[in-house]
Image (cartoon, rainbow, N blue to C red):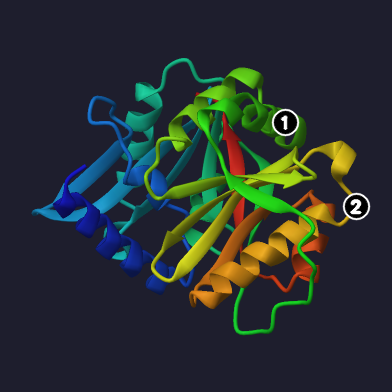
Amino acid sequence: MTDKQFNEITVLQDTCEKFDEITLKLNWEMLRNRKNDVNEDFFHYEEDQLVGFLATYYFGEKVEICGMVHPNFRRKGIFSSLLNEALNSLSSVKTILLNAPKASASAKEFIRHQKNCSYSFSEYQMVWKNQEVKEYTPIVKFKKAELVDFAFISNLDVVCFGFENSDAQKYNQRILNEPNRHIYIIEVNNEKIGKMSLLRENNESWIFGFAILPEYQGKGYGKNALLQIIQKEHEIGNEIHLEVALENSNAKKLYIDCGFRQYNTQDYYKMNK
């Protein structure tokens, strides 16, 4: 993807978000690390202006889709055309998920007319900012993940997030090579008990893939690890963001206890190709 296209997507995203009063989930860390030999992004121009954009994001044999159309060019079939183009490009995919901000009226209207689309789950987006960090004594340690940790990281995604093993391996092979992402192993007494990845951009720190092995959950290790990261990112002046599935009530409670608040909800719909 070219710098010109990045700028065009940013302008279109800003326009759509302001008009609809929503937050789109465009996974910018993945857009920036696209491979040139794979077509994962789809564009629609009107007189050299980008008015429609749709992206596909692969997580092994699962793909997530997110897109947008300029408010002045809606109801012209642009999004449907982009979606059909994207669906026709997919191969070796078991699950297709269409991502839509819960607050988007236009997304709800589009999905209402899709016969091959059914609600799957929702995801909360949460933020920590402008407050004191809760007191803690560091009882866990962090170390940067290395290739030797690959199997452990992938297994955590299987055990804690329900990934298929092959999907977990493909996903982690990709993110281990992302230059802006920091992946950490969480340890207690030199034992690996969990992991977390961190992405920093635009004075924001995003936490992804935070997981603790089931046998170590409920002992305060997860909260301790989270508070340490909050303290570190707060000291450099960043807001801290994360996402949690609606049905994961234990994780949401932990995040609220640490000072996070919900500010947005993303809905996901399963599509039949």
How many tags in the picture?
2
Residue 47 at x, y percent in the picture: 8, 54
- What is the distance, in whole Å, between disc 1 and disc 2 at their CAs? 22 Å
Q: Check the picture and name the quadrant holding the N terminus.
A: top left
The amino acid on which the numbered mark 2 sits, given as a three-letter code, is Lys
Q: Residues within 10 Å of mark 1 (few under 14, many from 20)?
A: few
Residue 228 at x, y percent in the picture: 68, 64
Residue 22 or residue 172, whichever sits in front: 172
Q: Which image quarter: residue 214?
A: top right
Residue 262 drawn above or below residue 100: below
Q: Which image quarter: residue 215?
A: top right
Q: Which residue appears at 40% of the width and 22% of the height?
A: 90
Which residue position is annotated with label 2? Answer: 219
Disc on res. 185: none
Residue 166 or residue 125, whichever sits in front: 166
Label whose residue precedes the other's in the sequence (1 or 2) = 1
The amino acid on which the numbered mark 1 sits, given as a three-letter code, is Gly
Q: Which image quarter: residue 255?
A: bottom right
Q: Which residue appears at 63% of the width and 24% of the height?
A: 151
Side of 176 relative to 119 (left or right): left
Residue 161 at x, y percent in the picture: 71, 36
* Outermost residue toward the front in this view: 189
Instruction: Check if mark 1's residue and mark 2's residue have beta carbons within 8 Å.
Output: no
- Say if residue 72 shows up in the picture: yes
Q: Which residue appears at 49% of the width and 49% of the height?
A: 182
The residue mark sitting in front, 1 or 2, is: 2
* Outermost residue toward the top in this view: 92
- Say if residue 114 shows up in the picture: no
Residue 97 drawn above or below residue 164: below
SS at circle 2:
loop
Which residue position is annotated with label 1? Answer: 162
SS at circle 1:
loop
